[in-house]
Image (tube, rainbow, N blue to C red):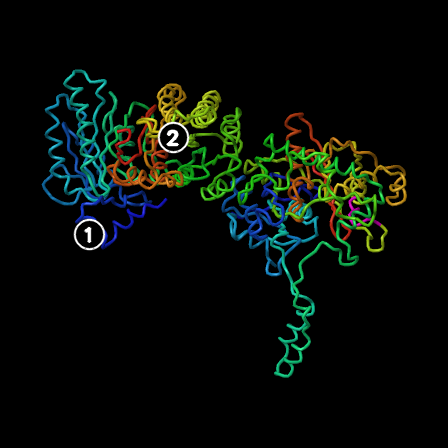
Amino acid sequence: MASTPASPAADGIRKAVVIGGNRTPFARANGAYAQASNQDMLTAALDGLVARFGLADEQIGEVAAGAVLKHSRDFNLTREAVLGSALAPTTPAYDLQQACATGLETVMGLANKIKLGQIESAIAGGVDSASDAPIAVSEGLRTVLLELNRAKTLKQKAAAAAKLRPKDLAPVAPGTAEPRTGLSMGEHQALTTAAWDISRAAQDELALASHRSLAAAYERGFFDDLITPYRGLTRDGNLRADTSLEKLGALQPVFGRNLGDKATMTAGNSTPLTDGASAVLIGSEDYARSRDLPMLASIVDAEAAAVDFVHGKEGLLMAPAYAVPRLLARHQLTFEDFDFFEIHEAFAGTVLCHLSAWESEEFCRNKLGLDAPLGKIDRSKINVNGSSLAAGHPFAATGGRIVATLAKLLHEQAESEGRRGRGLISVCAAGGMGVVGILEAC
Amino acid sequence: MADAYLKLVNSPPASGIAKKLGLPRPAELRRYRRGQPLVPGPALVLASGPAESLAGQLAGWGLEVRRDTASGEKLGAIILDLTTVSDPRELSGPMLAAGASLRTLAPGGRVVSISRPAASAPTPAAAAARQGVQGAVRSLARELRAGATANGLLLADGVGPVDPNALGGLQFLLSARSAYVDGQFLLVGPGGGRLPKDADRPLAGRTAVVTGAARGIGAAIAKVLHRDGARVICVDLPAAGEELAKVSNAAGGIALQLDITSDDAGARILEHARSRYGGLDIMVHNAGITRDKLLANMDQARWDSVIDVNMAAQLRINDALLASGADQAPRVVCLASTSGIAGNRGQTNYAASKAGVIGMVAASAAAFADRGGAINAVAPGFIETEMTARIPWGTREVARRMLPSLQQGGLPVDVAEAVAFLAGDAAGGVNGQTLRVCGQSLVGA
């Protein structure tokens, strides 16, 4: 049933709220979801969300999602997933891609549409499969094939085919290397981690906390209304509830191995390649109230930033360090005003570099132009139910996981303590980008 | 899951061969479809006393009503009003008249007796006559073929054959919704029964919770309740969430991932129903597990888990329902089992839990009646599910082919139809009862 958006509030802006979320458990690449495509997983995440909120056959204002590793045939990935889901086929959709910030950006973009009164309801999501990754032909083969297609005479065709070299036949698999530096994300972070002098022990402790917190959240049933099992997996496949500092400490460094004793980044304190999908239901307050749907948290604002990592002026994954102070300044907030911090754990080093940067007088003065350090964040407020190190990180699905988790945390706190808490989200992304946002309990 | 023999024997040339060899010839049962006639032909009304008002009521439902056996046409139903019998000798007239018409009963036809329970009879002779009805009808059921069934209503004192309470039960037993109910007697007492305004959507506007809804019988219940107009909240363990989401979306409902054995399960179910759908009208306790072992080999974990899921969780949730106060009259339907009636080798724990459900339902009836609601149980016999598909072939063939009069296992939808009936206003006079859906199996007969 189509609904006409209510007229916006006096200032033209109204609230957009998180109603709830759903995701598949995340699987390590080539594990439980090795045979699942992005479309399969996104459809499953949507169907789980539809079931949780009784949306079968309903028309949603708009669905936006995306994938980082995407087949060219999936040009309409989100719309195809909607058509395969239990949602009404009259639900429009679009694809969005902003590397690892894809999921968070879909939430923020759709929230803006709701705030402006363009739509009443929306589903934001993301999906990635490192197992079912697209494999391309080499540039050499591609050039020859295109030329063959244009050739009209036999002579032209023979000439085109003759350009083919044996090395052109090797397929090209996607990597996480930055196109402009040739360095993988891990190698980039290894440089940043070393520059900030982050110890191996500190990284392993953060990884351990992530696993323990995620395991504890599962134990108390926190994810019972955030996750729908998929293909036999009921919990994140990467979660190691029984890991320890000893086990993590025994792992050999995998990134920055040329850094000598500053090589601190292992498979244990870095996120693995992961498969999975997430979806978040958001809406106007009218939409939620008229359907007796819960309102967990209000989507307050977001900020994107980018850094010049190409010329070595900043670390590849440090953009959130710049986005956060800008967002805080716009709302005249400090770290003290937040109850929860969701800092995406691309690597333990990423989180720790950010904390160090915000505590550093030099960084805050020289890079951020602030008079004083942004300050210290109470570590007990960071990633309280674990984050990507334990759950895994299917690139575009991470934003949806974080938004739904934080919204529920804020709602739980509001129910038990009777006050409207606030949470900060920070997600770094390839290309030297970062997107951050603020949620507030309803 | 599929009963291959049933399909084979209903198609030529196997049907002819089976007939010649005297092999069992189970019929494809007549199951409910929207808009189908109540019964597959005219209804013959036979009575021990006056039955004009009953005949008038049936005509009002659009049935062609016959009062004598002369015509020889195919009959859709034979209805025996024996409410006035006070002496065993009064049975012969109507019973023999029914017998004379049995051969003209159409495939999927119905025989329904209406009589009174022996326990409240004024004289030993009346008690004998009343109890006699049950023996006669149950035996008659065993003579029927081609998917026809025979069942009875037992009307408590003060309930007349055309009272809404009685008519609700009569409609169910006549209809294709009772396809796998055979040889059963349903006790109908006083209460607020009424026929639904819309016969195709008798549960319109109601909110139902179904536990164990991810698969099998629970999934069928969710879909049938939805078909009948109810809004459905489908509950199952978080680990069963993938299937649960599919069922829930197919039933246009809500999936609630929840362990019913948790202490706060009842409160959370109620809270969910209230916040999303404004209340809870129907509670279906379907979730159940088996942990079969001979008692000699039984361990504590197997025993306790079965009791906790199949019985204790229902008790706790019912307590929460009764304590909740504000909700309108809740109608509760519990899943029992014929194992709980007859016992089953290797199932001491399961049979204890299912017999326990039957006892709990009887003992809870008054409390729910006080609230204007009711609590009843359905005891399935052999139902074709993933669970029974794992039974070894020989045992399975005996259970589905030899034991029930209908010579086949039931389908999950057959159990679901009985649940939907007991969940609705038409069963307003039914409380504290256990209705078997077993195709008249010898087990628990």
Amino acid type indicated by mark 1: Gly
**Above or below A233: residue B154:** above
Give the secondary structure at mark 1: helix
**Above or below A15: residue B435:** above
Compare residues A382 and B76 and report the one nearer the observer.
Answer: A382
Q: Residue B240 colored magenta? A: no
Residue drawn at (77%, 57%), measured in percent from left and top? A182
- The tag on residue B335 is 2
Instruction: Point out the stretch of residues depicted in magenta.
Output: A314-320
Q: How many marks?
A: 2
Q: Give the residue pinned by disc 1.
A: B16
Where residue A155 sits, quadrant-wise, is bottom right
Compare residues B255 and A11 and report the one nearer the observer.
Answer: B255
**Above or below A133: residue B421:** above
**Above or below A135: residue B227:** above
Instruction: Tell us which disc is closer to us: 2 or 1.
Output: 1
The chain ID associated with circle 1 is B
Residue B404 falls left or right of residue A423:
left
Mark nearer the N terminus (2 vs 1)? 1
- The tag on residue B403 is none
Main SS class of the magenta portion in the image: loop
Compare residues A370 and B102 and report the one nearer the observer.
Answer: B102
The C terminus of chain B: image quadrant: top left
